[in-house]
DNA sequence: TCACCTATCGGAAACGTTTGCGGTATCGTT
DNA sequence: AACGATACCGCAAACGTTTCCGATAGGTGA
């Protein structure tokens, strides 16, 4: 009954167990095991999916796929006529190159990864937009990951990017990352990394940030020049470099004008809305209430402003406020918020620029550090 | 002098032109052409880059790569011991699977594409965040494209996604797209598409949007109940469905309360800041100035508010304003902006959810249409 | 006519996986 | 003994490219 698939005879066949649910047979003559192939069946639905490949083009033109590949690129070894024919056929068959296959052989994915702590404010989306623009222009895709301010997911993100064989990485760290093995893993495989905004001191990679120190200095100087003398500072989490730099600017501005630096006028905020309110309360409840506050960023400044309004504290006469980063809300609140503008989209663009040249230059790239300028935007909240 | 690379003799060799800059030779005996292989040289720098593959693991353990592959997944045909050994070796060699190769053979990239018109407001970033979250949870990457409100780049974006073999697409159209061949291309290859926010009527795909009609109805009804009678509407670009739906809600609210619908109280805005100001001016300059305006979104409402403030028009007593979408700025402006809240992150999450099930179900997926609820948030700008 | 050239093409390996199926060893059952 | 079952493994093809290099045809100068 059962025919050997090789010698097509019937005598010397015996059963030989089952494999994966199917009966298996053994042909003594051929000394071969085999199972019966199933019915082809159900080849109905499948036409839809097929995307044309270079071998489709090659077959249609009766040439080899190498030739098609050459025609599709700028290669010398190609007859202009066949090239034209290939190009036309490609058009006709609606050919879309499979970038996955290409990436595999060139071991270059034309993709960069971005890891950001969050996505809620306008800050990181804007940076991503900037980075995405220059990446797209250079033919690169962007994979975005949110670490959600968690070290663990940041590590997971890094592994995902590694698995996707990104050509480079842009990263702004979590406020809780203190180990960097997951970043060093990129280096080990020659994948360039550029930090932005929240950078890592102890790694020798490129970094893009704004001149936080100078911005803070200008901001506090502005408050002093407007007659404020008891100036507080709502700072960020101590782990971040930008916190330290802005705090440094605050401190040095005071020193420059011979004002005392008072420990209790500096409160640290973890940047959440809730904590911002708490910090605002703490300052406004002091006996010797500050007459001005320099805030680590605009959202914090706005919470402070709302809290002050609640207590009928007049802004700017009784309380001057300066924020940092020029978020849209600050322009619209009353009084309008004085703030330090940072070129947010530029951060993304610069970081991506640097990353792309790093990718291009490969081994002989030397890391650089870029510090972008800040501008003080004076509005109503600090003028008296 | 020159030895044949096959027969290693010298007599029957003759030159035979040059190929790609290198001298070519011909061996009569072997009837073979050949060029001299170059020095191996410069194999110095390369250790860095190599990432361990399954064959590295296989060699280290002296087994075949198929076995390694099976060990790395949940496959039955594997000895628990060898599986453990493989897993440990993988750990030890710091193995990261190459998702590109995997995608190639499975013809599934585990990537979804998102096309959005822009990235500037908080709206689209928030949607993307929502979508990215559910995608990440399901092990999908996200590629983001900005069409910049341009039909041409939208088409280009679509081709990029196609070339990257995304498994599905989330899209919110440009305001100027009227042809849909680039979208249909996805369908043709069995790649599911889900529209959100700015959807396309004439395609039978899944769609996620908010109940614009109902939101608008509630908003205008609210204005009427607060005694406003001459209510204008700054609408969006006519090409968008949401514009028509919100306009419909506006119109039907008037009808419900027997108020006349006046053509000249509806102005269309292309959603740019500049045009918003212009629309605001147009309405505020009318002889029979409206006593309230329902705006197609918050940014437009805010521009209107600023323009009204410039003219010392009292809000809400002389002019009631309601916006749409509850952007952060509206909460902070004075008077605070009454607005229709839409669950922005939910739009992204829902769209991604639907897309993922569409991907999973394949052929037998039937498109669905999801309409998310809106909520009227009453603040100061519309109460009198 | 012969030696060598140029222009153009095809074959095949390689990239790193997954997977169908045949092969082998061992063990249990008549 | 002999047949059949089970467990596990390896081989090789396939995914869609790129690219090295050998092959061929036809030219050109001596």
Image: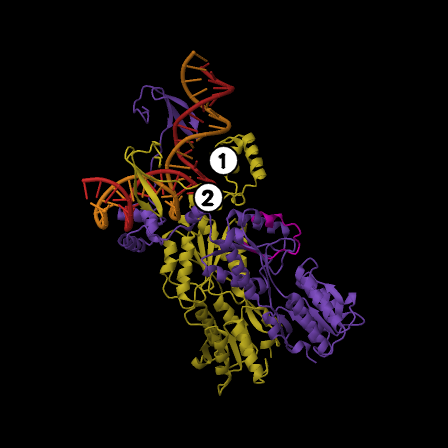
Chain colours: A purple, B yellow, C red, D orange
Callout 2: chain: B
Residue at image position (52%, 36%) is B57
Q: How many marks?
A: 2
Residue under label 2, please give it: B102
Q: Provide residue B245's location: percent of width, then percent of height.
A: 45, 69
Task: Choose between A292 and B238: the one closer to the eye.
Answer: A292
In this rendering, is residue A243 above or below A39? below
Residue A194, by quadrant, is bottom right
Query: Looking at the image, do the residues carrying marks 1 and 2 touch, with CB atoms under 8 Å apart?
Result: no
Task: Choose between B103 and A105: the one closer to the eye.
Answer: A105
Q: Provide residue A176's location: percent of width, then percent of height.
A: 66, 54
* In magenta stretch: residue A185: yes
The magenta region covers A169-186
Residue under label 1, please give it: B70
Q: Provide residue A177's location: percent of width, then percent of height.
A: 65, 53
| Element class at badge 1 | helix
- Mark closer to the chain start, 1 or 2: 1
To the question of a shared chain for discs 1 and 2, the answer is yes
- The alpha-carbon separation of the residues under discs 1 and 2 comes to 13 Å
């Amino acid at each position: 009954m059962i025919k050997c698939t090789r010698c097509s005879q019937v005598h010397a066949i015996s059963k030989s167990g089952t494999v994966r649910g199917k009966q298996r047979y053994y042909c003594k003559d051929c000394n071969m095991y085999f199972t019966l192939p199933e019915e082809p069946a159900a080849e109905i639905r499948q036409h839809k999916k097929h995307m044309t490949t270079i071998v489709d083009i090659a077959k249609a033109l009766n040439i080899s796929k190498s030739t098609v590949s050459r025609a599709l690129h700028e290669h010398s070894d190609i007859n202009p006529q066949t090239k034209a024919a290939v190009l036309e056929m490609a058009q006709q068959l609606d050919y879309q190159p499979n970038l996955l296959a290409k990436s595999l052989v060139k071991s270059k994915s034309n993709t960069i990864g971005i890891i950001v702590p969050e996505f809620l404010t306008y800050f990181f989306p804007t940076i991503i937009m900037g980075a995405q623009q220059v990446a797209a222009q250079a033919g690169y895709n962007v994979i975005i990951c949110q670490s959600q301010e968690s070290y663990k997911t940041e590590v997971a993100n890094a592994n995902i990017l590694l698995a996707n064989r990104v050509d480079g990485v842009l990263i702004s760290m979590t406020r809780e990352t203190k180990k960097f093995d997951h970043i060093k893993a990129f280096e080990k495989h020659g994948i360039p990394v550029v930090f932005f905004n929240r950078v890592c001191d102890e790694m020798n990679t490129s970094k893009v940030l704004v001149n936080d120190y100078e911005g803070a200095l200008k901001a506090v100087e502005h408050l002093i020049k407007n007659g404020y003398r008891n100036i507080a500072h709502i700072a960020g989490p101590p782990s971040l470099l930008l916190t330290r730099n802005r705090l440094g600017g605050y401190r040095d501005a005071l020193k420059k004008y011979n004002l005392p630096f008072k420990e209790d006028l500096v409160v640290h905020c973890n940047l959440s809305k809730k904590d911002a309110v708490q910090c605002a309360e703490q300052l406004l409840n002091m006996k010797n209430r500050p007459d001005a506050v320099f805030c680590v960023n605009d959202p914090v400044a706005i919470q402070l402003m709302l809290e002050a309004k609640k207590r009928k504290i007049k802004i700017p006469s009784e309380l001057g406020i300066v924020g940092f980063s020029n978020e849209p809300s600050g322009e619209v609140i009353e009084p309008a918020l004085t703030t330090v503008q940072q070129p947010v989209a530029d951060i993304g663009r610069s970081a991506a620029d640097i990353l792309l040249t790093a990718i291009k230059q490969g081994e002989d790239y030397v890391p650089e550090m870029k510090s972008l300028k800040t501008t003080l935007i004076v509005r109503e909240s600090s003028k008296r």
